[in-house]
Image: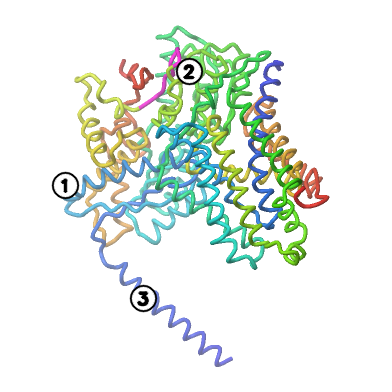
Amino acid sequence: MRRLSRLSVLILLAVVLAILPAGCAQDKTPDAYRIGVIASQTGPYSALGLPAIDGARLVADQINAAGGIHGKPVELLFYDDKGSSTETALAAQKAIEVDKVVAVACISATGLSHSMIAVVNDNEIPGLIMSGTGLVDSTLGKWAFKPTSSEKDYIPLPLGYLTDDLGLNSCAGLIENSGYGEGGEHYLKLIAPGAGVNMVTYQHFDPGATDMTPQLANIKASGAASIFIWGSGPAGALAVKQAREMGIMVPIVTTPAQNSPSYYGSFGTYYEMAPSLVCLDSKLTMWAQLPDSDTDKEMCREFDESFVAKYGRAPGMWDAIGAQFVMFIADGIDRANPDLSDIIKARGHVRDAFETTTNLSLFMGTHTMTPTDHYGRVVHKEVLVTFKNGEKILVKTMEQ
Amino acid sequence: MEASTVLQSLISGLTLGCIYAALGLGLYVVYGVTRVLNFAQGEFVMLGGMITVSLCAWGVPLFPSIFLAVFVVSVTGAILYRFIIHPARNASGSVLAFLTVGFAFAVEGLTLLVWGWEYRSLTNFLGSSSIHLWGATIFGQAPWVVGMTILMVAGLYYFFGHTMLGRALRACADEPLGARTVGISPERMGLLAFVIAAALGAVAGATITPLTMTAYNVGIPLTIKGLLAAFVGGMHRAEGVIVGGLLLGLTEALSAGLMPGGYHDAIALTILLIVFLVRPRGLLPAHANIE
């Protein structure tokens, strides 16, 4: 027994000695603002996460090249959510507890990012979530912020296009089974009647579906004069192709994911079939066609040119989202000027700064946060685009 | 409910079923000979599609592109067996299965590095166009997918039933020790099984890409569908894999067309789970290995 006790003491000592240097090392004040960026590097949403990482990395590089924030560089630590809510939460815990980041950004698919709301509030760290639905705007709590777009703000743009530009008043919803799709259907049901559009049927598809013909057959039978495809992955693009192959030639409007260059490259023929597909998009990708009077044109041009120079490709909407998350955090850190020797207090100061963000112009919108509104989008910047002769053509903006 | 929707769902289910059956056949060949559940089968399919798309983009005609893709993917299958499965051949089945999972992730990562994250597609083979029938549509590529699956089944039957090499594979599947005593090397037969499975996967990948698109991350979901088809139908018989694939495809398509509210994968999986609980050895249980 006595031998066992001695052994226990020795083990305890060894553990304490092992922990002490680590603890001492963490006491040293970090020489960079560490920001955790959680995104899908693998899994079903990696086509969204990987470009978002490119956008985030470019902004961080630009900040550091300009001397950092208050002389300190920004250090982005990337974590793979693997397309899983559990992995998203685990990655956040690692960023918060092990890597001691000052803020965390979750640039994942809508459903995945929702798992972050509880994590950042429980751990009292300022966190940004990439949720495309307004369903969570009132549940963000004290520590979560959402400097991106909610569907309730941009749904009127494609619906207005159907009624005002095309004179149509009936539509079928083809909705992805996901958090993003759930929000889309919720707000379509709320907003469409007031916009003069009768949603005659809602059909659903799983995010990994490769055949939507049964649902499209139901839409065809419903007699809907147009289709609204709501999705975040390749299934929505396949649905466009399959609708046209089935001879369904009514106007189709879609959410932004369907205008990815890779889908357009594969299915350009079907996208351009009259009446050509109309997609929601961001100003960033269409800056060259914006009028010179547009106040966002110069910001978009600069980013686009830097992006092309660094990556050899034009930025898309998810690159813009990744970029603007880092821009938002950098703005907060700049105003908070936190003392990193006490990471808990530093996180609190950054959170307070996020909450006083005023008229911050980003690619997807302009944000003014308040204690009761952590979404705070005061200017909406979506545009509608269509496709012709291998090019994207600007159809209309929110202002038009 | 419109009759055209029911017909469209049946056509969709048949096409999907053929895709799942083609996936399951590769799994069946490897499992029959080596008793390894190959979780990298979907990666063979993905690679077949990606390589064919790239070669076509470089101007290589379609069928030579597919031939080259089959060759490259077959070599990949040989590498998986020779350098990963064979050295660990005395390990348990679950360990070998996990090794294939690791290989699948490695292939996925390498594909991401080489091709990037973008989705890619092919045009329909020989420009075949859709056929409209009683209000339903048969996509131009669908007959190619059905034909490919029929050819695979016929080819496997001929190979295993009427060629010396196929009979040697069957001997290894039935009785590895006995096969060795008459001069058949189970190791060589294992290698051959992986090469055949990889080749089948590559052909399937090239053929389904015009319908489904392909990207670096489609392999694992495809493997899961193939495994489901094989488990439900019966892993020990090619007929079982075909029946399982068709059942899975039809269940998915009919639930998508006839049941409102979505979550069709969940509905299809629940139905298949019930089938699996009632017939745990599959709908068509073994009467002999590889036949």
Residue B98 shown in magenta: no
Q: Amino acid at mark 1?
A: Ala
Crowding at dot 3, Cα within 10 Å, few <14 / some 14-19 / many 20+, comes out as few
Q: Amino acid at mark 3?
A: Leu
Rendered position, B179 above or below A84: below
Residue A66, labelled with which disc?
A: 1
Sequence-wise, the earlier of marks 2 and 1 is 1
Identify the element where label 1 is drawn. loop
Mark 1 or 3: the one toward you: 1
Chain letter of the residue beneath label 1 in the structure image: A
Which residue sits at x=66%, y=57%? B189
Within the image, what quadrant is residue A283 found in? top left
Crowding at dot 1, Cα within 10 Å, few <14 / some 14-19 / many 20+, comes out as few
Real-space Cα separation, disc 2 to disc 1, in angstroms: 44 Å
Q: Nearer the viewer, residue A228 or A130?
A: A228
Residues in magenta, as a range: A273-281
Mark 1 and mark 3 in contact? Answer it, CB < 8 Å.
no
Chain letter of the residue beneath label 3 in the structure image: A
Q: Which residue in the protein does label 2 denote?
A: A252
Sequence-wise, the earlier of marks 2 and 3 is 3
Real-space Cα separation, disc 1 to disc 3, in angstroms: 37 Å
Q: Nearer the viewer, residue B1 or A309?
A: A309
